[in-house]
Amino acid sequence: MKDYTVKIVCPSCSKKIGVGWKFCAFCGEYVDNSKPKVELRYLDDSRGDYNSKKEKNPHFKMPSSFKQVSEKIKDSISEKIDKGEEVSDNTLSFFTFVITKDGVEIKELDEIVNDLQNSSIQKDYLGYYLQSESEDIYVNNVKIEVGKKHYLTNRDTLRQGETIYIFSLMNQKGVEWQQEGITLQIADKIGDSFEVFDDEILYLIPNDDQVILNNSIPQDKIRLKNYDLVSIHHRLFLVYDNQLIFQNELTEEQEKSIAENINSISDDTRLSVSIRKRLAGEKLLLSDIDFSVSSGEIVLILGGSGAGKTTLINAIMGIEKADAEILLGNINIYNQFDKIKRMIANVPQFSLHREKDSVYMTLKNAAEMKLVRDFTKDKSLLEDKISRVLETVKLTKKRDSLVSELSGGEKKRLSIATEYIADPVLFVLDEPDSGVDGSNARSIMSSLRNIADDNKIVFIISHSPDRTPELFDKVLVLAKSEEESCGKLAFYGSVEETLSFFNVNQLELVVSEVEATPDDYIKKYKDYRGD
């Protein structure tokens, strides 16, 4: 049973909450703790000493957008527990397409670990990573540094010698592959995103935002070279030994399976943050901050005064540029800010809505400003959209109320709703629960939980996190280094891991701990990660 953490399911709203909670944080109903369910999350020894924990090799945390895939698995596990039956590890993982001159075969990730020479694939709290002692290993057709961790994501290609591994989270095991020489005749088989010239050279034409080359979005027409991997609407094409290895067109059933099973994971909505430094003039504000967030996760940001919390979220949103690489999926936020800015929602602390407008009119106006015209012209679509947003933020009963009649907490949820209606990928909120009582704070946070469960990424700065600790997936702790006089990363992990690392029983106590000896915790975290 150590592979699973037991959760309680609210009988009223069916949301999962932490063991020991008498009232549901989502709907406020009394909870019977006698019928636990199971959450697929590896938390073995999560409250143990960090020195013993860091030597373990924890299971890969299933991406949040796989939640729908695992519902039947979780139900099955719960039934087995109820019957007293033994439970095995049902965690989902990557599988790979292994391509050699002999053809294509499909293997589970664990099957290839021992195949690699002078290289290893391991797991830590961020996921799977490759570490190589060989100078002849490439990821996404780029040679990687010897000894450096390289985290593997969806559609990554790894090449060692003449063997190519394509890592995939997409359910395509039943898709057939073809292999043909690059000629003029092949053009009809591979679609209008390719062009073949008389000299039998293949070009890629990025005429669709679903065209991805070596896990990046190409901007212009480009000549393909050996070992390049192209993904077009989940279909894979690989240039190999002057030939093209490609998947047959996906059937309607296969496309449906992908859409149902992985939601937006194939759109690579993971946020990867690597901040080398953030300067204001000559003053150093942030340095050495690296982490990644999966879609469907809420990240709580903690830190004392001057630690750089607001500076961090501004850097992530592209408002204040840093010496950094901020990737939302395949898109570099700094390089393509105009393209991505509509995917980022920054919810203000205070209501900016017209007091004499109704809740419905406020959302309708927001939709008309932020959504495409064809969508807002369709009244049924617009009505359905507004209704779903109101339900998500628990304002359905306030649909016809004036903004002036709303409480402080309701106004905050309305502000969240006006951003949510545009369907952004990333939400950033600075103290969304400030100035409201516990009940309103729980309502706000549970609304954000609903939004995150819609495959969004949510960042929250809060000074009262212990009112709803069970709603956070990750905690990011910043500390102001006394040695370098700038904000640095002091911890990043689950709530349970955070409490264990700082040896406290409340999240609010983390701030006082890290403020007392910031550099000690910065160093401790580096040791914890193995840096």
Image (cartoon, rainbow, N blue to C red):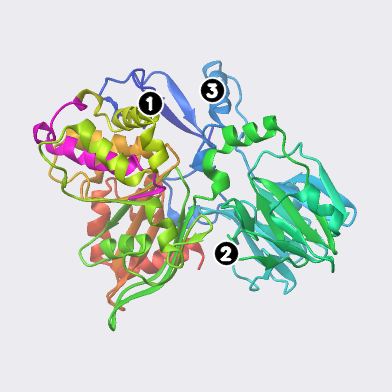
Rendered residue at 30%/45% (across/down):
369
- Residue under label 3: 75
| Mark toward the viewer: 2 or 3 | 2
C-alpha distance separating marks 1 and 2: 36 Å
Please state which of the two labelled residues, at mark 1 or mark 2, is closer to the viewer. Answer: 1
Magenta residues, start to end: 398-427
Q: Verify whether residue 207 appears in magenta.
A: no
Q: Tell me the residue at 39%/22% (across/down).
A: 14
**Tag in front: 1 or 3:** 1
Residue marked by disc 2: 219
Residue 267 in the image, given as x and y percentages of width and height: 55, 48
**Residue 343 locus on image (x, y percent):** 40, 51
Using the image, tell me which numbered label, if any, was put on residue 380.
Answer: 1
Q: Is residue 426 magenta?
A: yes
Q: Position of residue 206 (x, y in %)?
A: 62, 58
Marks 2,3: beta carbons within 8 A: no
Left or right: 402, with 470 as reference point:
left
Taking the image as drawn, is residue 358 in sight? yes
Q: CA distance from mark 2 to mark 3?
A: 44 Å
